[in-house]
Amino acid sequence: MVLEIRPQVGNKGTAIAAFMHEEPFMGRTPVFVGDDVTDEDGFVVVNGLGGVSVKVGAGPSEAQYRLADIAAVIEWLDAFAAGDVQ
């Protein structure tokens, strides 16, 4: 079981927007990977900032891309680190 605690004000999208106005994130391209409904606000903000949003698993999403599971995320990150993904 997992218990996710969220503040009454703000969400993952507002947190990402705030980070993107601070060093070292300012002027960079956001990349956000998530697997549940609480990540959707983050996907919307990242998309609006011209970043890369990735949904892990099934279900409707605002994310631009989708990966099947955690193993696929690890494979994608390994390829990115090796310079095989742009």
Image (spheres, rainbow, N blue to C red):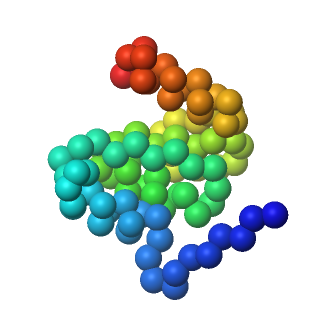
* Place of residue 64 in the rendered image (x, y in percent of width and height, measured from the top left): 48, 39
Task: Examine the image and state in which quarter residue 84 appears.
Answer: top left
Where residue 30 appears, as percent x and y from the top left, is: 34, 46
Q: Give the residue furthest to the bottom.
A: 8
Q: Relative to the observer, which residue lies in front, 41 or 79?
A: 79
Task: Please indicate whether residue 45 sits to the left or right of residue 72 in the image.
Answer: left
Asked if residue 36 is positioned above or below residue 83 in the image, the reply reads: below
Locate the N terminus by quadrant.
bottom right
The total number of labels drawn is 0
Q: Is residue 77 above or below residue 39?
A: above
User: Which quadrant would the C terminus be assigned to in this image?
Assistant: top left
Q: Is residue 32 left or right of residue 50?
A: right
Q: Which residue occupies 23% across, 44% down?
A: 28
Q: Hey, which residue is sitting farthest right in the picture?
A: 1
Q: Tell me residue 42's x, y (percent).
A: 45, 57
> Measuring 49% from the left and 19% from the top, which residue is drawn there?
79
**Residue drawn where x is 52% and y is 41% of the image:** 54
Residue 61: give x, y in percent of width and height.
Answer: 58, 50
Please tell me which residue is depicted at 39% across the width and 66% down the height of the picture. Answer: 15
